[in-house]
Amino acid sequence: MLADETRVERMPVLRDGEFVWRSVITAPGRGDHPPISPVVAQLVEAIDGQATVADIVARNAAGLDAETADHLVEAAFRTIEILYIDGIIADLRGL
């Protein structure tokens, strides 16, 4: 489950001297809004406290070849670990 009021939003982010629209993670009390890739945005948006990590990754991997799906699984678990350490994910029981 995500921390309270944590969500993915689209915001302008400074990149290479100009603003570009990117997905970011927003949460109360966090002044930073780290930009995230489209894959991470899909992963975070799917964390609802009900779906398991396997469910979420399977949805994101649908239609990918086996090698790409394997890379996605590995990256998803590392991403979840980082988001948990950073407090974006509040509870892993629902995952």
Image (cartoon, rainbow, N blue to C red):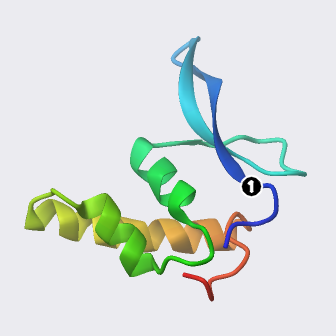
Left or right: 28, with 76 as reference point: right
Name above or below for residue 90 compared with residue 59: below
Residue at (16, 60) in percent of width and height: 68
Left or right: 31, with 69 as reference point: right
Farthest residue in the front direction? 50
Left or right: 3, with 54 as reference point: right
Residue at (73, 74) in percent of width and height: 90
Residue at (63, 89) in percent of width and height: 93
Residue 79: image x %, image y %? 49, 65
Farthest residue in the top direction? 18
Q: How many marks?
A: 1
Farthest residue in the right direction? 29
Name above or below for residue 65 compared with residue 73: above
Residue at numbered disc 1:
6
Looking at the image, which is closer to me, 70 or 18?
70
| Quadrant holding the C terminus | bottom right
| Quadrant holding the N terminus | bottom right
Crowd tier of the residue under label 1, counting other residues whose Cα lies within 10 Å: few below 14, some 14–19, many 20 or above: some
Residue 18: image x %, image y %? 57, 10
Quarter of the image for residue 15 reads top right
Amino acid type of the residue tagged 1 in the rendering: Thr
Residue at (70, 65) in percent of width and height: 86
Residue 21: image x %, image y %? 55, 22
Left or right: 50, with 75 as reference point: right
Which secondary structure lies at badge 1? loop
Name above or below for residue 81 compared with residue 61: below
Quarter of the image for residue 72 reads bottom left
